[in-house]
Image (cartoon, rainbow, N blue to C red):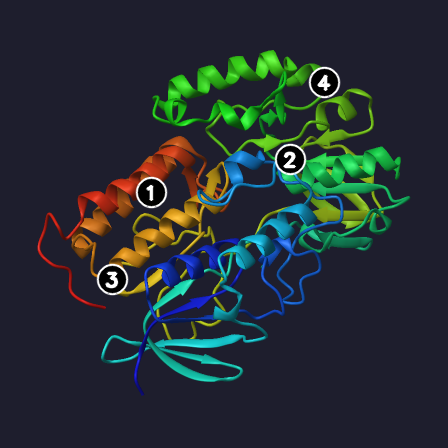
Amino acid sequence: MNAKQACIIGSGSSGITAVKTLKEHGIEFDCFEKGSFIGGIWRYNNDNQMSSAYHSLHINTNKYAMAYSDFPMPSDYPMFPHHTQIYQYFEDYVEHFGIRPYIQFNTEVLDVKRLENGNYQVVTNKGTGVYQAVIIANGHHWNPRYPNFPGEFTGETLHSHYYRVPNQILNKDLLIVGIGNSAVDIACEAARLHAGKVVISTRSSAHIMPNWLWDIPMDSLANPIFGNLPVKLQSIIMQISLLLARGRQRKYGVPVPSYPVLHEHPTISQDLLNLTARGLIKFKPNIKEIRGKTVIFADGSTQYFDMIIYATGYKITFPFFKNIAFQVSENNEFRLYKKVIHPDYPNLFFVGLIQPLGSIMPLAEIQSKWIAKILKGEVQLPSRETMLKSIEEDKQKMMKRYNFSPRHTLQVDFHPYKKSIESEIKRMSVNKRVSAPSV
């Protein structure tokens, strides 16, 4: 069986830019999408069962920072578009660049196996193909992670991944575990509905970042100049900016974490502080024990709840890797060079497997360009030893800055990371070095 050059798994926001990029570079490929549509998590009620979008969801990154480099969002879009507008943007992107015919829908990848000759066998529900390279773009916000607490809750439970509409939480005394973006969005929606008491349980809290600093999108402060400053100085500047934007968050009744700003992923909300100050959202520390519908917290207090929503993140999993012997740890640690390349599996690439302080889409775009140049033989990779050393250095740097938790194993700073991939493309150009081996 002749091997095509590449296979792309997934047609979400990362997959479609990989499709476009490989098409532009003249690389022969197949793209397999489990569902009937593009868009991944941004298609509400996607039939691939992987979407976590809820009805009221808006993007928390401004539209200019989120857009692909060669396809701006429409000028009439609001600064922080609704998920239906984001999905339409992806549809327009696919139509504009003519890439829909390159995506095979309703095609689920069942198994990826590396062959003795270095190629990859990809088995789908519709057949089997052999490829020189495989690009994984199946996302990492689809397999819910649940915590383990002593005891059993006898009320309703729901992971934030399955939250869709307010009727699911109406007239319920609600406990939300976690203080990330989804947790806070759901808490604010419940508080506005006066749905019952709304309590957020959090181990360490988070720095709450509003969408706006006066009339400037708050995330626009994270520009290339700011991104290249020392982290300590970035933290000081961001703390001053937050004080100007919303004052001291403890004054609103929201706990303040012990770590500095930018030493854990911030939570973005324009509404949480005000709703908390009005008494509509309360806070409790971590759960100590559950007894029926009564929850005992770490401070010894107890409260009764009808429902617990676990906004506790996701596991990184690849269900089609049945015959490839690398593992993702319980902490979501996955050791990739530049978050893209596994040093022990040549020509196995990952796109969008990152959690930036900023938007994934432009970073997935530059990752795809790097991969395309590798596949074309225009760029070569460093040695395995060099890649392993870089992976370990990145891990140590991450552990020094962040708490080592599943939430931060994929963390990158937008502009420094983008610059590092651009530098990799230039530094390792075969015009300056020996020719790269063909894939």
- Comparing 289 with 270, the one in front is 270
Image quarter (top left, top right, bottom left or bottom right) of the C terminus: bottom left
Q: Position of residue 402 (x, y in %)?
A: 43, 34
Badge 1 is on which residue?
A: 395
| Cα–Cα span, label 2 and label 4 | 24 Å
Q: Are marks 3 and 1 in contact (CB under 8 Å)?
A: no
Q: Measure the C-alpha gap from mark 4 to mark 1.
A: 35 Å
Secondary structure, mark 2, is loop
Q: Residue at x 84, y 33 (%)?
A: 192
- Disc 1 on helix, strand or loop? helix
Residue placed under numbered mark 4 in the picture: 252
| Structural crowding at the residue carrying mark 1, measured as other residues with C-alpha within 10 Å and reported as few (<14), some (14–19) or many (≥20) | some
Q: In the current view of this chain or complex, which residue is farthest to the right? A: 171
Binning the other alpha carbons within 10 Å of mark 4 as few (below 14), some (14 to 19) or many (20 upward) gives some
User: Which mark sits nearer the N-terminus, 2 or 1?
Assistant: 2
Q: Which circle marks residue 177 in the picture?
A: none
Mark nearest the camera among 3 and 1 is 3
Foreground tag (2 vs 1)? 2
In this view, 245 is above or below 280: above
Q: Which mark is residue 376?
A: 3
Residue annotated with mark 2: 80
